[in-house]
Image (tube, rainbow, N blue to C red):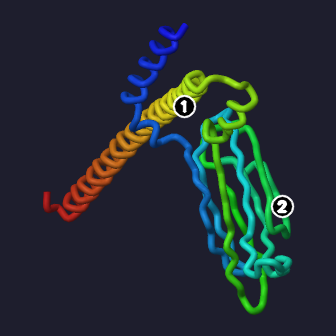
């Protein structure tokens, strides 16, 4: 059994070395802080592959610790898909959480609107958005299943590699789409150039024909 585990681990480590650059492309989103002024909007986009789990949470930093958050520090939040389908909407809140399974690949957008306030204030928002393998809490998995450290590491590696493989397939699909788009664009440009050339030749022919008629009328030719 241990020989089999070591063999799988060896193969997984070799595969990680090969695909390590792709690992950097995976969705490893850390918590960020956003500054938002009263009456303004700020949006963040995240490229997510289809059929991927996505979880996010946000909270406004209280400027007065130990006291209730002021009414001026309220926001409206909307998370939408590339086609504009709303996955989360919250109005006049100071914190919240959203989660969804993506139905299509593309750029998903989270927008924050700060309510108008006089005088204007600047809100600081702690925002954390994770997708794919980064959602899993491995400490809970280990505690719940009481698995050995080696088996847990193998599960982590397997999940990471599965995510990398899925991302590579997604990037390949996007590359094929871009190549098809380039072919269509080149074809349209060729057709347009050919039509432009025909129009120019037609105009030149008409001008020569008109000049010839003019000279014939004037008995020059």
Residue 84 visible within the image: yes
Please name the residue that numbered disc 2 is placed on: 90
Task: Say whether residue 104 is left or right of residue 93.
Answer: left
- Give 69 or 73, whichever is nearer the viewer: 69
Disc 1 crowd rating (10 Å Cα; few below 14, some 14-19, many 20+) is some
Task: Say whether residue 116 is left or right of residue 216.
Answer: right
- Give 198 or 52, whichever is nearer the viewer: 52
Labels 1 and 2 touching (C-beta < 8 A): no
Residue visible at 33% across and 42% down? 194
Residue 68: which quarter of the image?
A: bottom right
Q: From this view, report whether residue 16 is shown above or below residue 117.
A: above
Q: CA distance from mark 1 to mark 2?
A: 33 Å
Instruction: Work out which quarter of the rendered image holds the C terminus and state it.
Output: bottom left
Instruction: Work out which quarter of the rendered image holds the N terminus and state it.
Output: top right
SS for dot 2: strand
Residue 179: which quarter of the image?
A: top left
Count every numbered label the image shows and give the total: 2
Any mark on residue 160, and which? 1
Residue visible at 78% across and 86% down? 117
Q: Nearer the viewer, mark 1 or mark 2?
A: 1
Q: From this view, report whether residue 114 is shown above or below residue 221.
A: below
Disc 2 crowd rating (10 Å Cα; few below 14, some 14-19, many 20+) is some
Q: From this view, report whether residue 215 is shown above or below residue 55.
A: below
Q: From this view, report whether residue 42 is shown above or below residue 210.
A: below
- Give 33 or 156, whichever is nearer the viewer: 156
User: Where residue 52 sits: x, y (%)?
Assistant: 66, 36
Residue visible at 37% across and 28% down? 18
Residue 75: which quarter of the image?
A: bottom right
SS for dot 1: helix
User: Where residue 187 sits: x, y (%)?
Assistant: 40, 37
């Amino acid at each position: 059994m241990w020989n089999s585990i070591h063999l799988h681990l060896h193969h997984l480590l070799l595969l990680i070395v090969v695909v390590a650059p792709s690992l950097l492309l995976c969705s490893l989103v850390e918590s960020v802080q956003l500054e938002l002024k009263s009456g303004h909007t700020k949006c963040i986009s995240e490229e997510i592959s289809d059929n991927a789990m996505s979880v996010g949470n946000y909270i406004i930093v209280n400027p007065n610790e130990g006291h209730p958050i002021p009414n001026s520090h309220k926001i409206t939040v909307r998370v939408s898909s590339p086609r504009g389908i709303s996955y989360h909407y919250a109005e006049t809140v100071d914190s919240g959480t959203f989660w969804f399974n993506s139905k299509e690949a593309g750029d998903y957008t989270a927008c924050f609107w700060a309510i108008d306030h006089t005088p204007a204030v600047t809100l600081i928002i702690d925002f954390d958005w994770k997708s794919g393998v980064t959602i899993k809490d491995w400490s809970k998995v280990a505690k719940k299943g009481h698995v050995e450290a080696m088996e847990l590491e193998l599960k982590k590696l397997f999940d990471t590699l599965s995510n990398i493989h899925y991302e590579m397939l997604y990037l390949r699909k996007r590359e094929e789409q871009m190549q098809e788009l380039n072919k269509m664009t080149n074809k349209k440009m060729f057709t347009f150039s050919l039509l432009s050339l025909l129009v120019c030749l037609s105009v030149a022919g008409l001008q020569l024909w008109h000049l010839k008629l003019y000279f014939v009328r004037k008995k020059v030719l």
